[in-house]
Amino acid sequence: MDKELLLKSIKSLYTTAEQLSDGLVADDERRHALQQQLTSLKNSITTAFERVFEEICFQPHQSAAVRIALDGKWFEVLADGQPKTAQEIASVTNAEPELIARIMMVLTATNVVGEAGLQTYTATPVTQLLLDPGWANGLRHFFDHCGPSLINLPSYLERNGYKVPQDVKNGPFADAWGGRNTWALYQAEPKRGEIFNSFMTKFRDGTRMWTDIYPATSNLCGKVERSDNAVLLVDVGGGGGHVLKKFVKHPGYQTGRLILQDLPAALGDKAALKEQGIEAMAYDFFTPQPIKGAKAYYFRAILHDWPDRACREILKNTAAAMRKGHSKLLIDDMVLPDTNVPPRAAFFDLSMMALETGAERTKRQWHDLLESAGLRIEKIWSANSGLESVIEAELAP
C-alpha cells in the first residue's frame, strides 16, 4: 500500500470511529465495521511472510499457552488486579518461575495478560473473562474436543475425496476419536459433556433472545387461534426448556399451548415445566412430527449441528405437520452473508464441520436447503452481522 492509500484508509477509519456511540461495545454494527476496516488496514501493511509465519503457523500456540495457564490456575493469582511476578505466581501454584515466564511471554505478546515489568504480570479484560468458568470451558471445548478433529481434518478430507462430510457416524470427529461422535464421547466421558454444557450455557446467556430480533408479538402471539387446544409454539430440540421458560414471561404472550420437545434424557423435570405452563414431550426430530398445525415450530441452534442430508430429513418431518397458510417455521441460527463472511463466523463453520459434520450456512445456502424440503423463506431477521438471526419460513406454494 502506498502512502496516499494508507492515509485515505486512516481517514476512513476516523470517520467510522466518529460515528460510534459513547457505548462503544453496545454499538455492534458500527463497531464490527470498524473492526473490519482495522483488519483490512493491518493486512495491507503486513507482508505475506509475516502473515504466514507470525499469524497462520502460530495460531495454535496462543491457545496452548492459555490452556496451560488455565490448568495451572495462574489467572486466578492475577484475579485481584494487582501485578504479580513469576516468582509470586510460582509460590502459589508450584510451577517453576522459568516455565511461567516462558508461557507468559506468549500471553503478554498477544495481550491475553498484561506486562507490568520484568517477569511481572497483570490481568487484562481477556484474563478476567477467562476467569469465568463458562468461558474458560469454551476454550477447553475448542482446544480439547474440536482441536484433535481439526488436526485430523486435512487427512480425513483427502481420504474421502475432498467432499463435504455428510455422514455423522463416520465424519471427521468420529474419525479422530475412535469412531465416537461428540454425543457418544460425552456420554462415555461425562466430564467432557459437563465442559461443553457449561460453555453453551454461558454462550446462550451472552446472546440475544430470539424475541429481541423477531417481532413475536405481531407475527406470532397476535395470530394464534383462540381455542383451548391451539398450539402457539413447539420448541423442537429445546433441551431443558431454556427458551420457553423465558418466552412465558414475554409481554406479548397471552394464550396458546407451549410444547417442549427433545429426547427423554434432555427434557429435565416435566412437573416443574408444567407448573410454568410448558408441556414436555419426548421426541426425536428424525421421526414424523406428532404435533400437527401449530402456529410455529422453533429450532434454536439445531440445524447447524447437522449436514444438509440430515437437515432435509428434519425439515421434511416438520413441513409434513405444518398447516398451509397458518404454520410458521422459525430457525434461530446464524445466517452468514454470501460474501465477506466475518472471521468468527467462518471459524464457527469449520468447527461445526469438525465437530458435528454440521455447517453455519449463508443466506443462499439456507434458501436452497429450505426449498429442497418444500419450504419458502418469508424473511430473515438479523442482528450482529447475521451471527444472530431468525429465519421465518412457511410451506412453499
Image (cartoon, grey):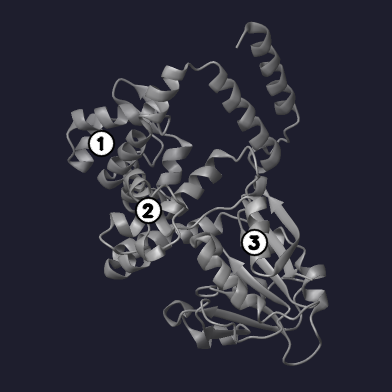
Reading the image, the residue beneath label 2 is 141
Labels 2, 1: front one: 2
Residue occupying image coordinates x 66% and y 56%:
389
Query: Image height check: is 226 above or below 328?
Result: below
Quarter in which the C terminus is drawn: bottom right
Please state the total of marks drawn on the protein image: 3
Reading the image, the residue beneath label 3 is 209
Q: Earlier in the sequence, mark 2 or mark 1?
A: 1
Left/right of residue 259 with respect to residue 59 in the rendered view: right
Tell me the amino acid under the disc marked 3.
Met
Judge by depth and name the residue closer to the eye, 156 or 140. Answer: 156
Tell me the amino acid under the disc marked 2.
His
Left/right of residue 179 with respect to residue 245 in the rendered view: left
How far is disc 1 from disc 3 in space, using C-alphas? 40 Å
Q: Residues within 10 Å of mark 1 (few under 14, many from 20)?
A: many
Mark 3 element type: loop
Q: Earlier in the sequence, mark 2 or mark 3?
A: 2
